[in-house]
Amino acid sequence: MALAPVLPGGFELPLEPRLPRIGSVDAVALEARAGELAKRSIKKESKLQALELAVRMMDLTTLEGADTPGKVAALCSKALRPDPVDRTVPPVAAVCVYPNLVRTAKERVRGTGVKVASVATAFPSGQAPTGLKVSEVREVVAMGADEVDMVIDRGAFLSGRYAKVYDEICEVKAACGEAHLKVILETGELGTYDNVRRASLLAMAAGADFIKTSTGKVSPAATLPVTLCMLEAIRDVNDESGRVVGMKPAGGIRAAKQAIQYLCVLHETLGRDWMTPDLFRFGASSLLNDVLMQIRKQKTGVYQSLDYFTID
Amino acid sequence: MTDVEKRHATPATLEWEYAPAPEARDIVSFQQRYGLFVGGEHVEPRTGEWFASISPATEEPLAEVALAGAEDVDLAVGAARDAYENGWSGLRASERAKYLFRIARILQERSRELAVAESLDGGKPIKESRDVDLPLAAAHFFYYAGWADKLEYAFPNRGPQPLGVAGQIIPWNFPLLMLAWKIAPALAAGNTVVLKPAETTPLTALLFTDVCRQAELPPGVVNIVTGDGSTGAHLVKHAGVDKIAFTGSTEVGKAIQRELAGTGTRLTLELGGKAANIVFDDCALDQAVEGIVNGIYFNQGHVCCAGSRLLVQESIAETFVGKLKRRLTTLRVGDPLDKNTDVGAINSKAQLEKIRELVASGKEEGAEIYQPPCVLPEKGYWFAPTVFTNVAQSYRIAQEEIFGPVLSVLTFRTPEEALEKANNTAYGLSAGVWTEKGSRILWMAERLRAGVVWANTYNRFDPASPFGGYKESGFGREGGRHGLEPYLRFE
């Protein structure tokens, strides 16, 4: 088994001047900064642009034991045309489902530009042998998943076995092939922002295309400060090595207003280059309709009741 | 090229701009003219002279204000003396507390109006007047209201007694907050006051007179005399004043101290600063960058305790300054009333000229200047956030207080060197230390010759925490129990 690097890629001990360490995060100041950014006031045309971008960045998600092909087919229709009344509303970025539903989803969205993301690696706990996780990933990719959302082994991470976490991500990345890898840190279980930063760097060093906050099964899921912390880690890796890694906050984002706050944090941390569905996603199951409602409010000036938006 | 990099090569599609989000200004209406507030009445100045207070963001005149002369100051001091002797000093302490609590609550209730007025008259961003100035001003009144009937417990067995009439002169950077810092402890201790607001920012003090009336504060307990430096000088020279409290420039502070030498009038001075913000290589970098930005660009750098010198450990200097410069590009300079504005207008033309002069000297002495690209409004007084690198300890920009959004970056190698450089200044008001190492924070705090040392934060104020300086930054403390002491004599 390979060893995890003491410092993640791009953070090797310096022979020339560079960040000499993983670094740390000051929780009080981080939360204060996120709080400041949440107060940004976005109005009118900018708001409409932000809301449409939020739709294009959405990974429309259903991760329930009760998911059926019928439920997923409905979700896919909603993903393709979120607002049947307003054709100018763009499709979402992807649908995110359990492995067994990848085929159904793929059939529905094939050729449309909407991607299929599948959770994998013993989601949501990650407490399974590595071999099982890797074969699960191979299988979902074979079934047509364009994107794989894996969970890290928090048991290993919290007991200090970073090498295990790192190796597993490397193996999963190899199993992904062409598919895109999002690594879920489950920040709600990591306890400190220092851990979030460490896990972010570890995941990026091991080859993550995206880092993602949460499974949605643990509270707290995504928060503004934890997202800011991860975005800062992404920025440091980009500064050091030029690598470009995406970000996906997931879970707990239910209101359009929150989505706009995340976009403000993104914009002021990584700038316009990251304001694209290729590099930022929202993982959400109930956010879409609130965003649609706000879009219609921006366009018509009045709110319509939820009955005017399809449930899926 | 990886898949992600290929995707990234497609151009981003969004031109993200915040639309203007101005706070409504019709919540505040200024009178055309404001007289002096003497003995609970608004009176015309005996001088017959008036001057305009303008908005530094637009140069538009907001209101005319009386220019108080010697006779006016004399009347105000007389009214304060009268109120002190015939009522206020004999009032039960819990009654004094009642008025202070009332004022605090009214400040909270009228906070939006006062915040807008503060931003209009002084040019500071509405998010600061709304989230910092007003809440803190109210908090000071609440805090000292609580002490009013507990002075015996604050100073046990010392028999605390009020002094009489306090003359208070405040600066233009935090007009209403400095008013609260001055008036709240003075009144809590049982004194009456004559307060002179700064020439360029008198309007919130004048609105405060209405707060006093609303609180039914007995006439003459608070008197406000507006004017220029000459008005302040009359107040300082007045024999009927028992104590002078001054916040402002070191130059004027020295003149006041010369004037009062040997007169027996009590004096506290809170003067300038040239604070060092010291960043060690083990700090939380991104949060330290935020702290440095807050330390120097907060209120356009018009802060006596501003962290105007950044001392950064040489091993991380390049990375850190890179992060700092990038952060500067996201600072939004412009309309103070816009809720998204981070840096507002320079308070006055005179101050703008002073900043320009010092920045020119920095360039001339060989420092390297960086200013983020930003479009400054054509009207009004503006200065882009500025960072100087390659600054030597001997440059004027490393020694003199600029009182503007200008940061001088110096480097150090060891904690000892950082300490030496930080203390190597005529001032000693505040300092900041950024490190994850608790023992180093304590080591530095013990040795820094500064009245306030912040660790892993900056520009944080609390009414319970004393504030004041060493050396040319003045003497006496404001805030906390310490802040009562200058307004009391002991038996």
Image (cartoon, coloured by chain):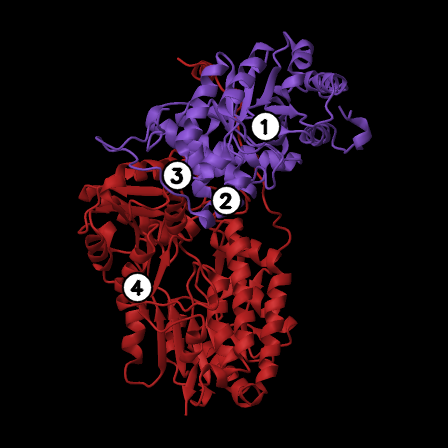
Chain colours: A purple, B red
Q: Using the image as rendered, state which of residue A95 and residue A203 is in the foreground.
A: A203
> Residue at label 1?
A123
> Residue at left 55%, top 75%?
B146
Q: Position of residue A308 (x, y in %)?
A: 80, 27
Measure how far apart labels 3 and 2 are at the Cα level: 31 Å
Q: Give a yes or no on whether discs 4 and 3 share a subunit.
A: yes
Tell me the SS state at disc 2: loop
Tell me the SS state at disc 4: loop
Q: Where does the N terminus of chain B fall, quadrant-wise? A: top left
| First along the sequence among labels 4 and 3 | 3
Q: Give a yes or no on whether discs 1 and 4 share a subunit.
A: no
Q: Chain of mark 3?
A: B
Foreground label between 4 and 3: 4
Q: Give a yes or no on whether discs 1 and 2 share a subunit.
A: yes
Q: Residue B450 has which mark?
A: 4
> Residue at label 3?
B328
> Residue at left 24%, top 51%?
B398
- As drawn, the residue found furthest toward the bottom would be B491
- As drawn, the residue found furthest toward the right would be A307
Q: Is residue B269 above or below residue A296?
A: below
Pointer 2 with pointer 4, Cβ within 8 A: no
